[in-house]
Image: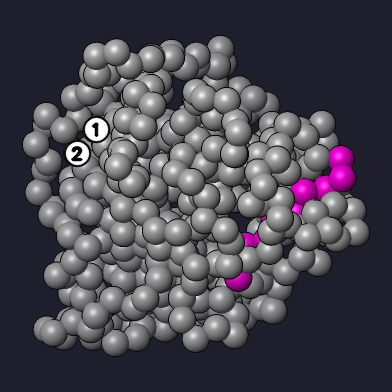
Amino acid sequence: MQRSSTRGRKAWLRWLPAVVAPAAIASAALVGSLPAGASNPLPAKTPAQVLELAASHRGGTFSGTLEQSADLGLPELPAAGKPSGSASGPASAGSVASVIELLTGNHTAHIYVDGKDNARVQVMDQLAERDVVRHGNDVWFYSSKDNTAAHLALPQRARGPAPTTDPAPPNDPHGSPGMHTPAELAQQFLSKVDPSTAVSVGPDVSVAGRAAYNLLLEPRTDGTLVGKVAIAVDGESGMPLSVQVTARGADKPAFASGFTSLSLDAPDPSVFSFSPPPGSTVKEIPVPENPHDPAKSHDPADAHGPGAMHGGAKGNVAVTGTGWETVVGTAAGSAAAAEPLLQDPLLSQAAIAVPGGRLLSTALLNILVTDDGRIFAGMVPPEGLQAAAAAR
């Protein structure tokens, strides 16, 4: 299941630089309050049958509104994740501030998907909107707040086989990480299902008016901050409709993402057409010369591949540990990636001094910035990050 997800994303994500995006994806699969119970009971299924149903989902077409909320004890950052006093213009994709923004406060997005080449995400900010649009080989990023746009032209060879999960736009260079669908978030947790995970099925739930199985994953290790993950699996299509993660020892989820409305019909084709508004500033994003070179890959999916889970490294990112105890770290000499965390007043105030660096601690995710500027992140206790830093 994990390998098919990796192959499905490579055509998308290989083109964009990402330093801590693996940590963002791994930790983003958290979710809020439980969906309402389903009124019409679904046919009984075993945990293995619900896992099989979820694995059978192949994306396709849909549109809907996605609500995401997080209460991790972090200060809420302004929209677009820019540090206070930062210069205007696109921020670094994969910046620490962008990752933290995804994990704080509330976010609403309208999502449209039609096959592997057409997708649009509209993230609604206060009095502003951010768009990520893919139409064929064209990818657009737009922020109405400062009327700026960025364009990426994917080479023809980037068009691979149809993804096995909903295709997701890449990270927004304006500093906003793209909101990932519950199917993508669920895949990150479903890939961890092994003997270290207890799997069960709770009472049916209803999400966006659709009856769903309540698949529950509980780590059997104390080496993770995660206590339980609840995935609502659509009883008809197998599409994950919501994902919820509760911290170890907590009685309610710390992060929630799920559909509040959903249609499985094909969206109107016009939603995938985008032209920069008059007066907007447009930036062209260059494509790496040889994006298929594994040594130059920054594909977040690679960081979750079978090799990476055993300490493999891709570019400036290395992954150590396995399953729930995975830690993502950057290489020495990448101090610039830590600047948003160290310079933002809110984040720097939240970070505490620990031996060897500074620690930003939340209920479900810890981030360690070492004195030499390396970043280590994972859903593990601080000791796990410090051990990973000492080993490199």
Q: Inspect the magenta stretch and tell me whether residue 206 lies in it.
A: no
Q: What's the residue at 63%, 66% (across, down)?
A: 362
- In the image, residue 237 above or below residue 195: above
| Mark 2 neighbour class, 10 Å CA radius: few under 14, some 14 to 19, many 20 or more | many
- Determine which quarter of the picture holds residue 274: top left
Residue 207: x percent and y percent?
22, 70
Q: Inspect the magenta stretch and tell me whether residue 368 lies in it.
A: yes
- Determine which quarter of the picture holds residue 133: top left
Q: Nearer the viewer, residue 13 or 357?
A: 357
Q: Amino acid at mark 1?
A: Asn
Marks 2,1: beta carbons within 8 A: yes
Q: Which residue is mark 1?
A: 118
Left/right of residue 330 with respect to residue 196 in the rendered view: right
Per the model, the C-alpha gap separating discs 2 and 1 is 5 Å
Quarter that holds the N terminus: bottom left
Left/right of residue 90 with respect to residue 385 in the rendered view: left
Q: Secondary structure at mark 2?
A: strand
- In the image, residue 11 above or below residue 311: above
Q: In this picture, which residue range is highlighted in magenta?
A: 363-372
Does the image show residue 21? no
Q: Amino acid at mark 2?
A: Asp
View extreme (front): residue: 85
Q: Nearer the viewer, residue 355 or 234?
A: 355
Q: Which residue is mark 2?
A: 114
Q: What's the residue at 46%, 64% (across, down)?
A: 70
Residue 72: x percent and y percent?
55, 67
Does the image show residue 243? yes
